[in-house]
Amino acid sequence: MESPLFWSDVYCEINQQSKVRSQYYFGLDVYNFEFIYQTNESGIKSPGKATFGGIWVTEDEPTVSFYFSLFNSIFESLELVGEIRVVLPPLYFFPSKFSKQAIALNLLGFEEIFLDVNFHIDIGKWTQDLLSKGNRKKIRQFNEYGGEIVLASSSDFLNAYHVLRMNRENRGVKISMDQDRFVENLVKLPGVYRTYLAKVGPDIVGVAYLVRISDEVNYVLFWGDDINFRHLSPVASLLNFLVSESRRDGCTILDLGISSVDGVVDVGLARFKKNLGAVETSKPVYHRSNQSD
């Protein structure tokens, strides 16, 4: 089974994320694994720049005992001091692998310090009927205005980034990726990163930055609208399009990301995603102060 994006060599290289790749012998079996992390002054975090981390094992169905032993081995080999933080994926993502890692971390003395709230679209079950009445109305209005959703070309990348940057600045926050990295991802990994534009005539009224993180999952890393066109709620039309696009990609999940910060829910954002027909799951974060510190 091919490693998901966050464990791939090219992602780790572009994002200066460290990776342990090796074989681990457990009983009579041998397993190929990758562990992603980044070191800082306080210790290590898995992942580094990725959305979530932990151990990726190519083979199916390792046991809790296996993960307990492998985590121990990894942490000893890295000769860690300070704290260790592990952000596991949302519960929908390969639960047979990561639910066992959660148990193993608990057994190793890690504390679940919070649960972030993640939302995703179950593509096989989603229909427009799951959209709120208001969002269905906005999609009709967007279409009546001649709105369309198109794949961005390279000449659109900077304008798309500007829309996303201004969308966040209007809310008093900053976008978490700089312009150069935004463009570099699209240029170097065009099969992984895509930008979609909601347009009314020549105007870019909304943007979605989509990432293929595994064969099964598309992830909306960023999306937002131009404040001057908010009355059309272009993000609803983007969502409607991205579900169809993800279905064509053969995906089963469209991940809309978290709606919380350090476990504290942004109620408005959570409500917005629920009104798009998204399903709520948790994304656990574990912490341990290393005993050799």
Image: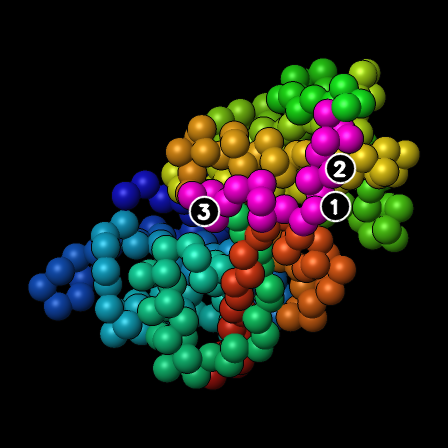
Q: Position of residue 196 (x, y in %)?
A: 65, 28
Residue tagged 3 = 125
Query: Which amino acid type is marked by label 1?
Result: Gly
Name the image quarter holding residue 183.
top right
> Quick one: SS at disc 2?
helix
Callouts 3 and 1 close, C-beta under 8 Å: no
The front one of 9 and 80 is 9
Callouts 2 and 1 close, C-beta under 8 Å: yes
Distance CA(mark 3)–CA(mark 1)? 20 Å
On residue 134, the disc is: 1
Residue tagged 2 = 138
The front one of 275 and 76 is 275
Instruction: Point out the tag, 2 or 3, that comes first from the N-terminus.
Output: 3
> Quick one: SS at disc 1?
helix
Q: Position of residue 125 (x, y in %)?
A: 45, 47
Q: Position of residue 185 (x, y in %)?
A: 59, 31
Which residues lie in the magenta part?
122-143
Query: Which amino acid type is marked by label 2?
Result: Lys
Determine if the magenta segment contains residue 185.
no
The front one of 1 and 199 is 199
Point 71% across, 34% down: residue: 139
Q: Is residue 89 above or below residue 123?
A: below
Determine if the magenta segment contains residue 123.
yes
